[in-house]
Amino acid sequence: MLRVTGGQRRETGPDGEWVTRRISGAAAAKTYRCPGCHQEIPAGMPHVVAWRPYGDGEDRRHWHSSCWQRRAHLR
Ligand SMILES: [Zn+2]
């Protein structure tokens, strides 16, 4: 489970609605693979986690902050 630190927000993109939260470097304890560029997000790097506002949270994805901001232009 991710620690809830607030700063959660709802975003609507070309691919629907997402809830996003910024993860600080201190809270990023694991390495993740970014679905935007398919590169790793190393532990300790601040990034964005996004998931659907409905469902069970199994669709959580960790993105580089820049990839998340850029994704709207990729579709
Ligand atoms: Zn990326």
Image (cartoon, grey):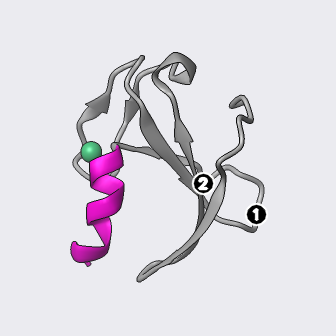
| Residue 42 x/y as whole percent | 34, 21
Instruction: Tell me the tag on residue 59.
Output: 2
Residue 63 appears left or right of 19: left
Badge 1 density bin: few <14, some 14–19, many ≥20, Cα 10 Å: few
- Residue shown at the point (41%, 83%) measured from the top left: 14
Q: Which residues are magenta?
A: 65-75
Quarter of the view holding residue 18: bottom right
Residue 50 appears left or right of 62: right
Residue 62 appears left or right of 4: left
Whether residues under marks 1 and 2 lie with C-beta atoms below 8 angstroms apart, the answer is: yes
| Residue 33 x/y as whole percent | 36, 36
Query: Ligand 1 shows up in which quadrant of the image?
Result: top left
Q: Residue lying furthest front in this view?
A: 7
- Residue shown at the point (33%, 43%) measured from the top left: 64
Say whether residue 74 is magenta.
yes
Relative to 72, say whether 25 is above or below: above
Query: How many numbered discs?
Result: 2
Quarter of the view holding residue 39: top left
| Residue 27 x/y as whole percent | 57, 22
> Main SS of the magenta segment?
helix
The residue beneath circle 1 is 55
Under tag 1, what secondary structure?
A: loop
Asked whether mark 2 and ligand 1 are closer than 8 Å, the reply comes as no
